[in-house]
Image (cartoon, rainbow, N blue to C red):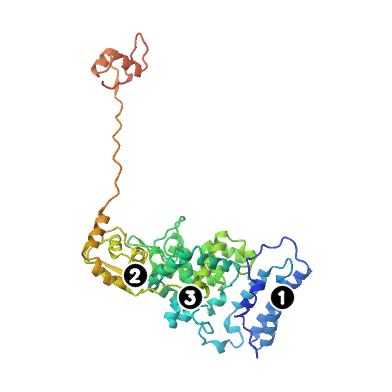
């Protein structure tokens, strides 16, 4: 007996349902469109009822077949909104997996079962035991949940073209941070691909990133939101810049919003960008509507419309790089520590370590792994720094003595020249007229002429009258 399965349905519907969500039609739908919408509602209800019954696979399949046929007709019917059909399939796909007839038969299948060779992330390939948590979200394959519509395709193209350098730097930064960040997501039961997608879009893996609005850290928490999820200031260090703490708080936030939005991933991500209050009010006005539904999609800001597919596209590329002729480099990221043999700053270590093994140099990696230190601060001998394991050996060879150490110290000791101080403006001299003073007497005492003194004080000839208490400006000495 054929089992109802939605895993492949979205791909069958791409031609009919995928695409940029159209603006809602201004005119009322005609009879043909109304009939198609009625079939959509009936088929959705019949499919869910059949799944609930547990033994009505034929009815479930019949509902799916008719829904697919109606979606195809919608694509060729003027005024019919294909996004409504895509949203319906999205809703069915997210229905609890244990409600599907025969679901128990598949419980032990790997999340990557059936995937073609080479299509998984290098992380998954290197750590197959982590594959399930890498790729699953609330019991569903992440690849099945992500809707491959036009906004997603646009975002994938952007990551592969103008933002490819950003994607590759985000990948490299994440690899060095992975041992700190991924365990937090794993504990929270969230897929690693989602963590990478958010990190790539938020900061590119720059731990000390700060936005114009004040959002800070690798996952860009605002101060109030960070405090709500346990990110405070400890011994003067803002924990939003701590990769492990930021990942823990981000995972808690996403799980909270998944609970609010009934495990709808796109709405949870939209809340992270656009604010949970605004998204909750929007969802309440449009119950059961997916993010791609025009009523929701065109009600959020352009920033959020861009943000959600960019996050999901980066997650998708994390899982399936080779489908897009994309190759993430393999990097030796085994964590280690080094103990400073002599005082040095992170800036100086970056200079003496050079760029062997890292074309961009080691500054970003050293900063990311040691977020509490100012890179210009001279650290005392004996200070422990977190580093990738290759740097521990390189440090002993390059940064304990020799010409590179001397060069780094010389550069670090230099200072930008400062402009010379401007000479202080001379305060104009003043004299207060006393009883018995004359213009000539005042001029003689201060070394200037009577004419100059009269001129700068606007005294009228021929009498040049003075009054007791009058303040005179004294002319400069010649």
Q: Secondary structure at mark 1?
A: helix
Residue picked out by circle 2: 357
Q: Quadrant of the N terminus?
A: bottom right
* Front residue of 237 and 319: 319
- How much space separates mark 2 and mark 3, taking CA atoms? 29 Å
Give the foreground label among 2 and 3. 2
Q: Residue 191 bears which disc, if any?
A: 3
Q: Secondary structure at mark 2?
A: loop
Residue picked out by circle 1: 70
Q: Which quarter of the figure has residue 73?
A: bottom right
Percent from the top left, x then y, of residue 430?
Answer: 30, 23
Residue 450 in view here? yes
- How much space separates mark 2 and mark 1, taking CA atoms? 56 Å
Q: Who comes first in sequence, dot 2 or dot 1?
A: 1
The extreme right residue here reads 31
Task: Judge the density around disc 1: few (<14), some (14-19), many (≥20) Cα neighbours within 10 Å.
Answer: many
Residue for point 54% across, 61% down: 274
Seen in the picture, residue 347 relative to 332 is either above or below; the reply is above
Tags 1 and 3 touching, CB below 8 Å:
no
Residue for point 66% across, 87% down: 57
């Amino acid at each position: 007996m054929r089992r109802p399965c939605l895993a492949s349905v979205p791909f069958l519907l791409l031609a009919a349902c995928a695409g940029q969500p159209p603006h809602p039609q201004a005119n009322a739908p005609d009879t043909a469109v109304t009939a198609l919408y009625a079939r959509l509602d009936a088929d959705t209800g019949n499919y869910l009822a059949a799944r609930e019954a547990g033994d009505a696979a034929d009815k479930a399949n019949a509902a799916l077949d008719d829904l697919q046929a109606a979606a195809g007709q919608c694509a060729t019917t003027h005024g019919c909104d294909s996004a409504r059909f895509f949203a319906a399939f999205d809703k069915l796909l997210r229905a609890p997996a244990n409600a599907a007839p025969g679901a128990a038969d598949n419980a032990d299948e790997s999340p990557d079962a059936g995937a073609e060779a080479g299509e998984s992330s290098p992380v998954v390939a290197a750590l197959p035991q982590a594959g399930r948590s890498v790729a699953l979200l609330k019991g569903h394959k992440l690849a099945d949940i992500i809707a491959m519509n036009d906004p997603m395709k646009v975002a994938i193209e952007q990551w592969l073209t103008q933002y490819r350098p950003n994607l590759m730097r985000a990948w490299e930064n994440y690899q060095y941070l992975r041992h700190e960040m991924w365990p937090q997501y794993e504990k929270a039961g969230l897929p690693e691909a989602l963590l990478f997608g958010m990190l790539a879009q938020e900061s590119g893996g720059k731990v000390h990133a700060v936005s114009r609005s004040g959002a800070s850290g690798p996952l860009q928490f605002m101060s109030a939101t960070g405090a709500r999820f346990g990110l405070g200031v400890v011994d003067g260090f803002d924990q939003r810049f701590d990769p492990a703490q930021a990942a823990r708080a981000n995972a808690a936030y996403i799980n909270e919003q998944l609970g609010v939005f009934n495990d709808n991933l796109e709405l949870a991500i939209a809340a992270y960008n656009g604010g949970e209050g605004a998204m909750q009010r929007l969802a309440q006005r449009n119950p059961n509507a997916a993010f791609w539904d025009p009523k929701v999609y065109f009600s959020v800001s352009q920033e959020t419309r861009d943000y959600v597919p960019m996050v999901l596209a980066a997650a998708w590329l994390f899982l399936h790089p080779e489908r897009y002729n994309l190759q993430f480099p393999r990097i030796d990221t085994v964590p280690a520590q080094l103990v400073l043999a002599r005082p040095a700053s992170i800036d100086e270590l970056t200079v003496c370590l050079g760029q062997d093994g890292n074309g961009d140099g080691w500054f970003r990696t050293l900063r990311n792994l040691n977020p509490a230190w100012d890179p210009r601060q001279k650290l005392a001998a004996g200070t422990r720094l977190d580093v990738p394991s290759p740097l521990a050996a390189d440090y002993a060879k390059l940064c304990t003595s020799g010409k590179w150490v001397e060069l780094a110290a010389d550069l670090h000791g230099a200072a930008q020249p400062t402009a010379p101080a401007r000479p202080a403006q001379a305060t104009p001299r003043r004299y207060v007229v006393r009883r018995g003073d004359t213009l000539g007497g005042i001029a003689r005492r201060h070394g200037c002429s009577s004419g100059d003194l009269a001129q700068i004080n606007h005294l009228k000839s021929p009498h040049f009258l003075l009054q007791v208490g009058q303040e005179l400006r004294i002319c400069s000495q010649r």
